[in-house]
Image (cartoon, rainbow, N blue to C red):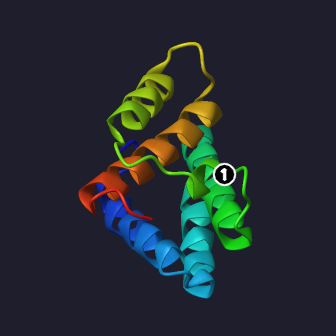
Amino acid sequence: MILPTDLRPLVKNFFELMIERKFTEVEKILAELRYKAKGRKLFQGYCHGLEGMVEAFETKDPFALINHIPEDLKEQIAFFKKESEYPFHVDFDKGIFGAWLDFSKFLESRGGKA
């Protein structure tokens, strides 16, 4: 996780609530994360990635990655890890990839189900 240690439980709770489709609670956590991300491009990108996940998951966008999670997440995790560390990406983009990396790892820890 690219987030500070103190924010990790909050993000884990975010992922759990999003999967449970409790979008009101998800928005509250997202607002808190946005507040803590002010002035830090990496974390702003991370929050932007989370926002995109919520929107696609909430609307059941048939083309969105979040609605087509593969059973074996190893390849997806490797891809997002590589992109989140790629030196030529700006911090904002690294944050987006980092959010996807964390979500993929979260899903893997749950057996790969969203």
Quadrant of image for the C terminus: bottom left
Residue 5 vs residue 52, the one in the foreground:
52
Image spot of residue 43 (x, y percent): 55, 47
- Give the total of numbered labels: 1
Specify the quadrant of the image occupied by residue 73. Answer: top left
Specify the quadrant of the image occupied by residue 5. Answer: bottom left
Task: Give the left or right position of residue 75, taking residue 40 as reference.
Answer: left
Q: Secondary structure at mark 1?
A: helix
Q: Identify the residue shown where x is 27% and y is 59%.
A: 111
Tag 1: Cα neighbours inside 10 Å, few (<14), some, or many (≥20)? Answer: some
| Residue farthest top in this picture | 88
Image spot of residue 89 (x, y percent): 60, 20
Residue, disc 1: 48
Quadrant of image for the N terminus: top left
Image spot of residue 6 (x, y percent): 32, 61
Q: Amino acid at mark 1?
A: His
Image spot of residue 101 (x, y percent): 43, 42
Q: Identify the residue shown where x is 49% and y is 18%.
A: 86
Examine the rendered structure and indicate whether residue 102 appears above or below residue 27.
Answer: above
Examine the rendered structure and indicate whether residue 24 appears above or below residue 74.
Answer: below
Task: Give the left or right position of residue 20, taking residue 2 as reference.
Answer: right
Q: Identify the residue shown where x is 62% and y is 72%.
A: 31
Q: Identify the residue shown where x is 63% and y is 36%.
A: 92
Examine the rendered structure and indicate whether residue 79 appears above or below residue 32.
Answer: above
